[in-house]
Image (tube, rainbow, N blue to C red):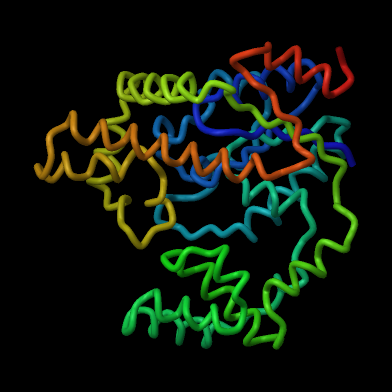
Amino acid sequence: MKIIAIVGPTAVGKTALALKLAKELDGEIISCDSMQIYKGMDIGTAKPTKEEMATVPHHLIDIKEPNEEFSCADYAAMAKECIEDIISRGKTPIFCGGTGLYLDSVIEIGSFSSGFKDESYRAQLEALALEKGNKYVHNMLKEIDSQSAEEIHPNNLKRVIRALEIYHCTGVTKTEWDKKSKEQKPPYDATVLFLTCRDREILKKRIDLRVDMMLAEGLLDEAMTLYKNGMLKEEYTSYGAIGYKELIPFFKNLAPFDECVERLKISTRQYAKRQLTWFSKKENYHTVYVDEVSPYNEAMKILGKA
């Protein structure tokens, strides 16, 4: 089954290209953004507007409340259902977003280890982390699976615990399971367009402009509403969304507004850098430099539609 994906750092123009391609190729868009799934988090996550979503069908946007849990495994299952549905109607699935892990969970080989779970063991590790710290649990992983420990930050407790849980359930490390997974054939024929800027200074300016535009569109009010409704709590996965927690010090009168905005811009640039690192490692992705070519024209060439 053929699918298209448009990925890249924030503010690079993914949504605009996805909309153009969807209209041209009779496609439907599947969001692969880990924060656009949450209701009420519209401006800060740069969701397509209601007008844009009215012109092209969109999937996996506004499907959870900010206080609800949602995992990568949940996403993979739902995204695959979307693909099947879209293709069954003769349409083209077009993924669009910047969460590389979510896209990988769909188009790359599924891990053999995904089905192994032990809730009680996981709870024990969570308690241990509270008592002795994340680093202690990370060191446990390092002793049995040094490669996974190298790839997973000690503060990413969920992934550290998951890797330990896999070994606990199977006696085989996550690294070994992933190695076995890669021996399988990919489930989809995916063409991935990686949008980026050759000149990183241009991307930086685009990010700063994006933040200014979000504030002009009402980001402060949106963040305040979520804050007052108790939806910006550290224990929620949605708390990781950039654009909200950076404004909390202003709401608490702990920092001036301008300082919080600057922190927001810095956090966004740092996130974009992490996205670039993730996507640039993918050898089979088609890189499109949006500061040098027309993204649409280049995409149509790559897709053989020019």
The residue positioned 34% from the left and 32% from the top of the image is: 265
Residue 73 place in picture, x, y as percent: 64, 61
The quarter of the displayed image where residue 145 is located = bottom right
Q: Is residue 176 above or below residue 55?
A: below
Residue situated in front as seen by the camera: 233 or 293: 293
Q: Is residue 19 above or below residue 128?
A: above
Left or right of 272: which side holds 115?
A: right
Residue 138 place in picture, x, y as percent: 47, 76
The residue positioned 18% from the left and 28% from the top of the image is: 258
Q: Is residue 14 above or below residue 114?
A: above
Residue situated in front as seen by the camera: 53 or 146: 146
Q: Is residue 239 above or below residue 126?
A: above
Residue 7 place in picture, x, y as percent: 64, 34
Residue 128 place in picture, x, y as percent: 39, 85
Quadrant containing the N terminus is: top right
Left or right of 247: which side holds 145?
A: right
The quarter of the displayed image where residue 127 is located = bottom left
Q: Residue furthest left?
A: 253
Quadrant containing the C terminus is: top right
The residue positioned 41% from the left and 65% from the top of the image is: 155
Left or right of 257: which side holds 197?
A: right
Figure label count = 0
Residue situated in front as seen by the camera: 12 or 24: 12
The residue positioned 75% from the left and 73% from the top of the image is: 177
